[in-house]
Amino acid sequence: MKKKKSRVSGYNKWGYIFLIPFTLAYVVFQLIPLANTIYNSFFENYMSGLKQIGPTFVGIDNYRKLFEGGDIWTYAKNTMVLWIMCFIPQIILSLLLGAWFSDTRLRLRGSRFFKTVIYLPNLIMASAFAMLFFTLFSDGGPINSLLMQLGFIDTPYKFLSNTGSARGLIAFMNCLMWFGNTTILLMAGMMGIDTNLFEAAEVDGATSTQVFYRVTLPLLRPILVYVIITSLIGGLQLFDVPQILTNGTGDPMRTTMTLIMFLNKHLYSKNYGMAGALSVVLFIMTGILSLIVFKVSGNDKRKG
Amino acid sequence: MGRKKNDGLKKGMGIRARRGLAYVVLITISFFCLFWFYILFINATRSNGELQAGFTLLPSTHALDNWRNLIGGTLPMVRGMVNSLIIAASSAVLSVYFSTMTAYAIHAYEFRLKKYIYPFILMIMMIPTQVTALGFVQLVSSMKLEDSFIPLIGTTIAAPVTFFYMKQYMESTLSLALIEAARIDGSGEFRTFNHIVLPLMKPAIAVQAIFTFVNSWNNYFTPALILHEDSKKTLPILIAQLRAADWLKFDMGQVYMAIAFSIFPVILVYLVLSRQIVQGVSVGGVKE
């Protein structure tokens, strides 16, 4: 017995050995950078013309400047507006499609084809997709000439010069890229619901709308919360599409400038103090959101 | 009860009407998913002059001209694709191999730190790479690794999302009795992992390799911060450069060809592997 035990623990040292690559890569490429980012946030460190200012320790001055400057609120608002504009149509569409795909009575033909098609945009390079939309929706682009050929408009509509349409395009692209993913997640959740419940509801005379609101939605709550929060975390990271579409300017009038675009700007101008402070703020925000996900999926998903 | 049923019939739609509605919505949505790529394909085959003339749904004959102009132009597109391929392929291989190894460490062994390490990896899963970008850029420049692919590829060795997928897959397929049997037959731990565990994980490995490849292929934020030399740039950086250039002077046929060149390889891969990919998403459930 004793011998066996020591042999087992002898094997178990391999647990540590197999963890070495992950740990090394994590510490070098993620943990040290994270610590370094936090460290930087307490220093004044930027270029003023050709002159390097700092690094000097300034305590929480960068944070004070960040929040008093006001820009961060504008960009946070833009980010939230873009996320909401994208998420509401996305979740409605995904719930609807998920319900249809998982409804055995409906017996949709070609559902594999449709699933393949709606997931496709998720894999497309966001920057190339944004560039494509930029050319298609430019003032002399194909969409404008199509609309003029069809007689809807007389002069080209300036999609990228109006706040509403510029934001709309960004939200539309993101919605297109993510609703397939959400649909498949929700569908997997709906398939997991006991079919007896649906049959019972049907016997009791519930319509499909009633079944959806009274049976499907409540049972889907944990996965819905998961989808909402992970989408919100993804929304905070919104960058590629607005960056390429507006060439980093956030035009018109910085109404499509997101938080990560703001961060990117500081990184390019080498204003490391402010970039650090902004990163830490974003880190805390995602941290809080992640804790919620962790709690929700810890309670419900990991058992399944 | 009878009345309730009548109410239901009045309010609810018949199954055929609902099926019809479903098809209409699905076809509309599919149209919106594919339309842009169809125009992209058409426009990549048209010359600049034809593109200025207006919109059409029919392809033209200038695809080869556009292609030649693009390759002979100022943007190093072919180089960019080679760079993207090198980074994405190495990331996929390393990420999948080491994530499986990490998952195996947690799955197959009992050790004291395990109960801290597993929750820790789950906690860091959601941290976006953007928030550590500042420190990452500084680290890379202090290690003199700017314009090198090593930091981009090395990062993917520690991929919590891939790890989590592998761990879940292992829980459902890999029995500890099998590992015990290998031990009794005298197989070393490392050998067991490479020759018994890895082959059993093939389906999960394929799915995650595709996702890692695609994510790396599409990644713009981090590579743009550390790759500055023209010969090192990846496709997304070149696309951004194309956008930043005074594009009105550009031959639009070339622009469309450049976009198509970045997008179509992924679409081709997807057409071949769509079944596994779509299944992979619904099984994994944690792709952000």
Image (cartoon, coloured by chain):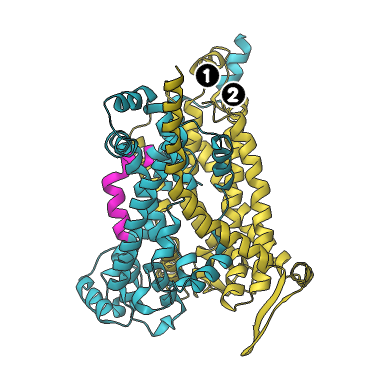
Does A132 sit above or below residue A113?
Answer: below
**Left or right, A282 with reference to A211:** right
Query: Please, which residue is most extreme toward the bottom here?
Result: A50
- The answer to whether one can see residue B282 in this image is no
Q: Mark 1 points at which residue?
A: A198
Instruction: Report the front residue among B218 and A57.
Output: A57
Q: Distance between the residues labelled 1 and 2?
A: 7 Å
Query: Callout 1 environment at 10 Å: few (<14), some (14 to 19), or many (20+)?
Result: some
Q: Answer whether labels 1 and 2 touch (C-beta < 8 Å).
A: yes
The secondary structure type at the circle numbered 1 is helix
Color used for chain A? Answer: yellow
Q: Position of residue B258 (x, y in %)?
A: 33, 71
Query: Callout 2 environment at 10 Å: few (<14), some (14 to 19), or many (20+)?
Result: some
The stretch in magenta equals: B264-279
Determine if the magenta segment contains residue B266.
yes
Upstream in sequence: badge 1 or badge 2: 1
Check disc 1 and give the amino acid type: Phe
Q: Can you tell which mark lies on residue A215?
A: 2
Q: Where is residue A54 in the image (x, y as percent from the top left)?
A: 69, 81
Q: Main secondary structure of the magenta part?
A: helix
**Left or right, A253 with reference to A104:** right
Instruction: Report the front residue among B16 and A237.
Output: A237
